[in-house]
């Protein structure tokens, strides 16, 4: 979406709310993006198999705002797994 100044702004629309899921323990790593040190936290979130969650979705689970990086299903479709990331800005 245009910001009116020649740039753009990402916006998200509510797609699913109140969907049951389970979040695993986070795994931290650090990364330098645009000369800024950031902590990137990886989360695995598990949903029911028919849940419509896709790469690029932004989800809020347990108060964490997460970006869905990839989704996968096991060979026996008991759940859908979303590999997600959370970025924390640092010094």
Image (cartoon, grey):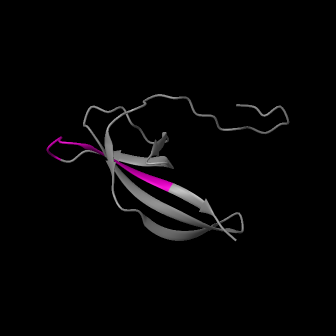
Q: Is residue 14 left or right of residue 62?
A: right
Q: Could you tell me which residue is drawn at 57 percent across and 58 percent down? A: 87
Figure check: 78 above or below 23 = above
Q: Could you tell me which residue is drawn at 59 percent across and 61 percent down? A: 88
Residue at far left of view: 76
Confirm whether the magenta stretch covers residue 68: no
Q: Is residue 62 left or right of residue 4?
A: left
Figure check: 54 above or below 70 = above
Confirm whether the magenta stretch covers residue 80: yes
Figure check: 43 above or below 80 = below
Figure check: 25 above or below 64 = below
Where does the C terminus fall, quadrant-wise?
bottom right
Q: Could you tell me which residue is drawn at 18 percent across and 40 percent down? A: 77
- Between residues 91 and 68, which one lies in front from this camera angle? 91
Start-end of magenta stretch: 75-85
Where does the N terminus fall, quadrant-wise?
top right
Residue 48 lies in what quarter of the image? top left
Query: Residue 13 location in percent, x, y?
Result: 55, 29
Q: How many marks?
A: 0
- Between residues 62 and 45, which one lies in front from this camera angle? 62
Query: Residue 49 location in percent, x, y?
Result: 25, 36
Query: Residue 54 location in percent, x, y?
Result: 41, 38
Residue 38 lies in what quarter of the image? bottom right
């Amino acid at each position: 979406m245009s910001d009116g100044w020649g740039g753009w702004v990402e916006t998200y629309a509510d797609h699913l709310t109140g969907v049951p899921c389970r979040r695993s323990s986070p795994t931290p790593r650090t990364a330098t993006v645009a000369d800024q040190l950031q902590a990137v936290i990886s989360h695995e979130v598990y949903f029911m198999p028919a849940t419509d969650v896709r790469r690029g979705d932004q989800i809020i689970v347990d108060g964490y705002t997460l970006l869905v990086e990839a989704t996968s299903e096991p060979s026996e479709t008991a759940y859908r797994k979303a590999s997600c990331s959370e970025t924390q800005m640092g010094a």
